[in-house]
Amino acid sequence: MNLPLMPKATAIWLVENTSLSFKQIANFCGMHELEIKGIADGEVGAGIKGLNPITNKQLTKEERERCSNDTEADLQIIVNEVSTKTEQSKKKKKYTPLSKRQDRPDAVYWLIRNHPELKDSQVARLVGSTKSTIDAIRNRTHWNMTNIRPQDPIGLGLCRQIELDEAIAKAERSLKRAEKKKEKEEKERLAQTNENNLEKEESSSVTIEE
């Protein structure tokens, strides 16, 4: 999926300067509709300057007008070499802007506290952190622990709501599988114990009769 450069800044501009629906903007920027609503309400992206995708040559005026007149239509991005390379780069490794990297420990702490079901690898992938940093925060041995405050990574712009939702759903499925496996093993253990006890009883009965 091709996304515009700086999706959140692009979404902010579209919210402020067009009559496009939240769904259209969300689909175009690869974000969740609730994130777009948060932008419109001033709860998400505060302080971020909007980026015009038209002057940035990623959207045409005609396309914007077409979708403004048809809320069911999807905005079509202008695919160019730069955006394609950026998309490929994102698939290789999550890039976090320098201005946001200092916020990652706060985001990690928030995820650890609010979603303990997430694996360290999932937390690392969501906010672009490392396992060593996550371990240090989890064990409260991080060098800057006294200054780390839990903050929602979505509000910080480190990940999207849809990415967090998918990670949580995956973690919950994994937990359910682990629980089912544990229940199955426990049933098998009890069955084996009962079988062993029955064999002992039968053995004792045979010995008494002899």
Image (tube, rainbow, N blue to C red):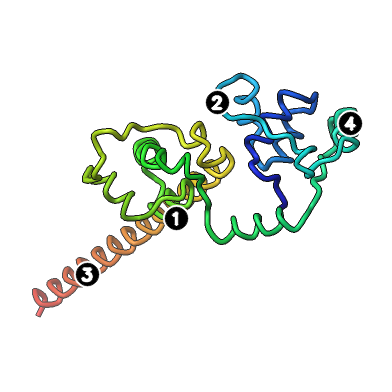
Gap in Å between the C-alphas at discs 2 and 4? Answer: 27 Å
Sequence order check, earlier mark of 2 and 3: 2
Where residue 147 sits: x, y (%)? Answer: 28, 33
Q: Earlier in the sequence, mark 3 or mark 1?
A: 1
Tag 2 residue: 47
Which numbered mark, 2 or 1, is in the foreground of this view? 2
Give the Cα separation between the discs numbered 2 and 3: 69 Å
Residue in view at x 60 percent, y 25 percent:
38
> Is the C-beta separation of discs 2 and 3 under 8 Å?
no
- The mark that comes first in sequence, 3 or 4, is 4
Closer to viewer: mark 2 or mark 3: 2
Among numbered discs 2 and 1, the one appearing first in the sequence: 2
**Mark 2 vs mark 1, CA separation in Å:** 42 Å
User: Which residue appears at 28% of the width and 60% of the height?
Assistant: 190
Give the left or right position of residue 210, taking residue 202 as reference.
Answer: left
Mark 1, residue position: 177
Residue placed at 31% from the left, 58% from the top?
186
**Where on the picture, by quarter, is residue 85?**
bottom right
The amino acid type of the residue labelled 2 equals Gly
Q: SS class of the residue under badge 4? A: helix
